[in-house]
């Protein structure tokens, strides 16, 4: 079956960096658009970044310039490189997949279980 498994979260001081990873299986990875979402306690889940099968990307305005989404199709891996972390970045980060980038931003078909990112002051 389809599995998306996130890793790389943790507790980091403000200004620090993290690299989140998502390992995909059970899908033709290279044909899928992929995305990263996050959800803070008591808040709505929001799209952080998305990447199309062809490499086009988009980002939440508040993370642009600090976060970079990338993919390695040979390894079926999705990444989110994060720099200059802020306390407001604290959330559970989820990997998502869909058939195209429009769908990954509106109604992803598959979700991972999430990885916790906590940023201290």
Image (cartoon, rainbow, N blue to C red):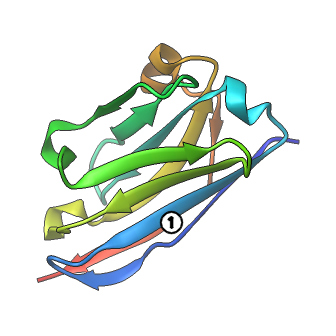
Label 1 SS: strand
Describe residue 106's horizontal placement relative to residue 99 as left or right: left
Look at the picture and state if 97 lies above or below 76.
above
Look at the picture and state if 87 lies above or below 13.
above
Snapshot quadrant of residue 6: bottom right
Q: Residue at x 54, y 22 (%)?
A: 54
In the rendered image, the quadrant that contains the N terminus is: top right
Measured as percent of width and height from the top left, residue 101 is found at 49, 20
Measured as percent of width and height from the top left, residue 17 is found at 29, 74
Q: Residue at x 41, y 46 (%)?
A: 69
Measured as percent of width and height from the top left, residue 93 is found at 43, 56
Snapshot quadrant of residue 62: top left
Q: Which residue is mark 1?
A: 115
Question: Is residue 71 or residue 7 the one in the foreground?
Answer: 71
Label 1 crowd bin: few (<14), some (14–19), many (20+), radius 10 Å = many
Q: Is residue 90 visible?
A: yes
Residue lying furthest front: 74
Measured as percent of width and height from the top left, residue 8 is found at 51, 72
């Amino acid at each position: 079956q389809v599995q998306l498994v996130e890793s790389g979260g943790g507790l980091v001081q403000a200004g620090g960096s993290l690299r989140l990873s998502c390992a995909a299986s059970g899908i033709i990875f290279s044909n899928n658009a992929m995305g990263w979402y996050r959800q803070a306690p008591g808040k709505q889940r929001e799209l952080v970044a998305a990447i199309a099968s062809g490499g086009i990307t988009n980002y939440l305005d508040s993370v642009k310039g600090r976060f970079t989404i990338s993919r390695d199709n040979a390894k079926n891996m999705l990444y989110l490189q994060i720099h200059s972390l802020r306390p407001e970045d604290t959330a559970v980060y989820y990997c998502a997949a869909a058939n195209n980038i429009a769908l990954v931003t509106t109604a992803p078909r598959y979700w991972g279980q999430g990885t916790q990112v906590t940023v201290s002051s």
